[in-house]
Image: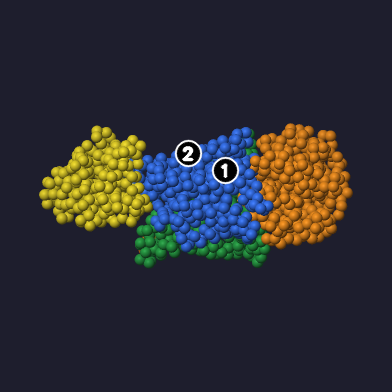
Amino acid sequence: MNTFLAALSSGTSRGAIFALVALGLVIVWRGAGIVNFAQMGQAMFSTYIASTLITNGNSYWIAFFVALISGAVLGALLDILVMRPLSNKKQSELLSSESMRAAVPVIASLGILGVLQALAGIIWAAEERGFPAPAKQEGFTVAGNVLPFTSFDLFVVSIVTVTLIITTLFFTKTGIGLAMRATALNQEVAKLSGIRTNRTRTISWAISGAASSLAGLLITPTSNLSPNSLDLVLIVGFTAAVVGGLDSPAGAVLGGFILGMVISFVTFYSTPEDVFLAILAVLLIVLIIRPRGILGSKDARRV
Amino acid sequence: MLKVENLVTRFGSVVALDDVSMTAQESKITTVIGANGAGKSTLLRTISGLEHPAAGSITWKGQSILGKRPEEIVRLGIAHVPEGHAVISELSVEENISMGSLFRRKKYKSDVTAAMDEMYALFPRLKERRKQLAGTLSGGERQMLAISRALVSRPQLLLLDEPSLGLAPLVVEQIIDSVNTLCRTTGLSVLLVEQNANTALGVADHGVLLALGKVVADRPASELKADATLRAAYLGY
Amino acid sequence: MRAVSNHNKKSIARTSLIRTLLFVAAILLVGAQFDAYNQGQLAVVLILFIGVLSVTLLTGISGQLSLGQGALMAVGGYSTALLMINYKLSLWVAVPLSVISSAIAGLLLGIAAARLRGPYLAGTTLVIALAIPTIANRFMSVFKGDEGLPVDVGYPPQWFSNLFGEPGYEQWQLYVALPFAAIALFFASNILKSRTGRMWRSIRDNETATSLSGVNFSRQKIYVFVISSSFAGLSGALYGLRGLVGPSVYPVSLSLLLLTAAVLGGIRSITGAFIGTVIVVFLPDWIDLVLVNFELSEQVSNYLPALISSLLLILTVVINPAGVAGTRLHKHK
Amino acid sequence: MKNRASLSRSPRKSIAVISAALVGALALSAMPAQGASTPGVSDTEIVLGMQLPQTGLASPGYNKVDDAMRAYFDYVNSKGGVNGRKITLVAYDDEYKAGKTVTTASRLINKDKVFAMVGSVGTQTHISVIKDINRRGIPDLFVLSGYSGFYTDPKKYPTTFGSLGTYVTEAKILGKYIKENMATKNVGILYQTDDFGRNTVEGLGIAGLTFTAKKNAASFVAGTQGSGLDAQMQQLKDNNVEVVIVGAVASAFASAVASSNKIGYKPQYVVISVGSDATTFQTILGARGIPAASSAGLLAGTISASHAPSPGEADDEFVKAFKKINDEFNKGPATGKAWDNNVLQGMNIGYMMTAALMGAGKNLTRPGIINYIKNNPSKLSSAALAPLGYSATTHEAYTGFWIGKYDATAVLKPIDGTRKMWTTDSAKGPVTELKYTRPAIAADALPKVG
């Protein structure tokens, strides 16, 4: 019973973070039609910034907000410096085909990931670091029994829930949210409606950058920070996004929790070596049975 | 009002517009007719900034709009309804319409609501389906929606590309009528591209006949309509 | 009609053969000028060139982006190592057999991947690249976990030494890799010029049109995967023969290295594949040549090759997407 | 028709010509074997090579070893070097990827023309090059890996010598201690599923401690400890394990303690020396917001073993001397030169290597130094509290360990107050007490070989 509870609780707090990562991927996918493989590289980078601030004596919360802002700025910069010039290159021969138009930004994002990791290595990485949590990492005690659910886990789950609600409202209730959805769905019509699509795309990148920085800040206290430490998180987050539906924010959340539970229960009840194979199995099953993801819309652009 | 001079647009080695000059007059319906592939749509797409011309000039109210991005050109008062009921099917009817007014929301908040209401008055069927996804509408409704999306930005010039495509004659008539009424009552200028020359020339004040990217005739609509030889040579009926 | 196409086939084969022989001659001549270290590096170039060709065929020619070529290399490597260790086969037998096993792996992957496109395919293959090496730990008794299976090219047979003199260890690696690279080059340039190559290009350029024109789209896609996997498997087998077949030999970064090489050189051309491979293999050495003049800490110099190759990757995609060999290609068209 | 025939003939001819040229080129390209002088040794310099992970997931901690070694060599050089020759250490980053290790090894051998390899870090990576290095007769000295496969068959790898005890030996010694002192307790294990973890399980098995997966044995894939070990620690807690043996690296031990702390689980930890580095432990927990005093508290009471003094033993004469040299000569980054067990290991290897170079004499050759090391392990003393175990049957370094317990200041102290050394082999041999008096360090901190 204890094991079951532990698995459930670990799956919940992990799942919340994977949901956030998946959400970041979904936002850029919807906003710019790109799967951003550099996303957790950006998160790693802004978490290092936070870590440096804390080491230099600043409070956790200052570091927290600076990291979110720098995540957003970094995201916007990457769009302006790399992705926008790339999308203006559509005339070139390499990008002339539909399939390559989808593939080339992925390649570019892998390049960005490499640059960010190398830079982080040059600037910060002599040692693997830890990262503090803003809440106690000791389990709640109920009837003398220590539950494997800590104040920090509670913090993670609530802050992720709030973020998800805000994001949903932003997309459905605000004009800029509508502009972003329109840009994602049909650029030409969006442009003809007077929407400055370059700008909305940059905003997508910024929001996604902030969301993934939040994920980085929330996941590093239970792991360690190094230039490559978030690589796995990205892969799990990607799987979560695909499982839920790459164009559906609600799907991202669902996918995140499914992956959190799968990983948690496999680790608790089977051997940890099976985790990657389990991730692969979940991904393949979903892609074969329902390629657009559980909540993905029917004509999701599967390019 | 809108003046196009010596416009050349190329797609690779294919010349789609070859030295095209024409004007759209204020508060008038100007129609561009021609066979399939004559360059009619390209003309509209070049005006609205979706295609980049290789040469020539486009002047709007005395100012060059050449090289401006489509989203800026809309802001100057030229709204484009591209071919094929261009709406976003994953968004609701309401969202599609309000999309066209997003850029005006800050400055003209009350006018945006008024404009939306006007659209529902113009096409009452859209009001009934406000919450539905655009993808669930019929072809005619989608065309109405596309036009509403363009009109809600309060343009002075409406570029309308083949509104009749794939629609039943009755629906076409209704749509063309609405546009015609709008032009006559509000002073909206319209540049109407049509393959169906009869319908177009029926409402238009002026007609431009394109063939293989070149202007072959530029006359009052009634004259064009009467010229049987031209019609036989370029439109095949 | 048939006679003409047969004739075409023959002349394509002949051009490819000449190209291949010139390639072999050039490698031998250049290799002779090199010291042992650079001969070893040249061997790595030949080995990875085969892997990069697998990317060129899959991504450049048929438009499918895979980040899991490293996993297919691992299939080739493990097959070779198991055949050599458990069945005492010579590498000249084991390597061709492992090409078959990677083709089978490619068939399975292709069946699963045939309905995936773009980022979906990229992400799925990335998960595969991560998951496959963990099998080595899952089935310890066969794959020997993290320690892996040590194999190498051994020493040349006596007749070879008698004829050509005793080659150094790195030189022998080069000689072993060369015939395989030559065969791969011959096949790749044949495929590209043939009807199959044109069909694959049309898959890339317009999926709908291709499926309308009666080409069995899914089957062709799977076929591309099988061919590409065979190349990757061959490359992986030879890569493992440098000393060890194990999870740390085929990390996820290896897949990314192949992709980087293919893009830098020019993802649509065989020449580009070779140029790109030369760049990624020799880049650290070139950087060192420059760095000798500066006092840089290890922390900086260790990350510089990764930084520069990633920057080159971004710049290539943004500024010159056709890669180094691209200019030539543009003229061609 | 005629035309076509001639078209097809000309390529055929050129193919023949090129093929003939190829055979010629092949013959040309074969080079004669290298000259006979000893590579890497000149009148003024000895070049040594090393490979280790300096970047990537496996690098933390180990990336300090080369700087420490180099610092010691620089110190030796400042005193005039060995027989008038300065020692140069060339270290390359292999990122802990075996494919890269092959390249860096070839570079060290062919480009930098190193005399010997020294202190190379890693098991999987070293497996990929050990055969080639031995085949070339290059000394492969003081390898920083406890993998017994490298050392227990000197006929297979005659030039390879270790600088650690094997994981099996250490596990046997700790296993015996647990058997004798915690017989009534429920003993379990947390290990990483690689050679290190498995050798640990093997050694404990010889000592009579066996484990059942999903009951009292929990494992994780090496390198994934970063994402927490909640599941593993929960499992051990649920099975009422009172003593947790940790066969994992230091960052994993830190993760395990953090995870246990979360669920209020406070078992007795017994940690293989690789995993019990106090500095790494405190750095990682410290950055997670656990202050040094609290993390020392979490570490306190943990049992571990060592063949050397603990880096925290400030009054040990070797620790004192090495620390001083490190402060003065280490050119690594600030965090890289911070004194810890990795730096101590690096210094110690530098010290032993210097001794071996001195002992091999003025006429330095590869077979010469290998013979010297093989025949004079007793002359290669160092900070270690056990003698080198090199013999005709094994090239493992230390077969002796002492068992200690961390005190409240994060220093490993002998468990019963007095230090007792235990020794055994990597096979089924018994664990016996070892009497060894470590030769003192000279005033100039240089090794003396008589």
Q: Are marks 1 and 2 in contact (CB under 8 Å)?
A: no
Secondary structure of residue under mark 2? helix
The image position of residue B136, as x and y in percent, is 33, 56
Mark 1 to mark 2 CA distance (whole Å): 20 Å
Which residue is at a point 61% across and 45% down the rendered structure image? A221
Host chain of mark 2: A
Quadrant hosting residue A260: bottom right
C67 relative to A152 in the view: left or right? left
Quadrant hosting residue A297: bottom left
Res C306 visible: no
Q: Which chain is blue?
A: A
- Judging depth in this view, the residue of A236 and C324 nearest the camera is A236
Which residue is at a point 75% across and 38% down the rendered structure image? D72
Secondary structure of residue under mark 1? helix
The image position of residue B84, as x and y in percent, is 29, 52
Binning the other alpha carbons within 10 Å of mark 2 as few (below 14), some (14 to 19) or many (20 upward) gives: some
What residue is pinned by disc 1?
A217
Which residue is at a point 53% across and 47% down the rendered structure image? A160
Host chain of mark 1: A
Q: Which mark is residue A77?
A: 2
The image position of residue B28, as x and y in percent, is 18, 41
Q: Earlier in the sequence, mark 1 or mark 2?
A: 2
C61 relative to B195 in the view: left or right? right
Q: Which chain is orange?
A: D
Three-letter amino acid code of the residue under disc 2: Leu
Three-letter amino acid code of the residue under disc 1: Leu
Which residue is at a point 28% across and 42% down the rendered structure image? B115
- Judging depth in this view, the residue of B45 and B202 nearest the camera is B202
Q: Which chain is yellow?
A: B
- Judging depth in this view, the residue of C59 and C115 nearest the camera is C115
Q: Colour of chain C?
A: green
Res A303 visible: yes
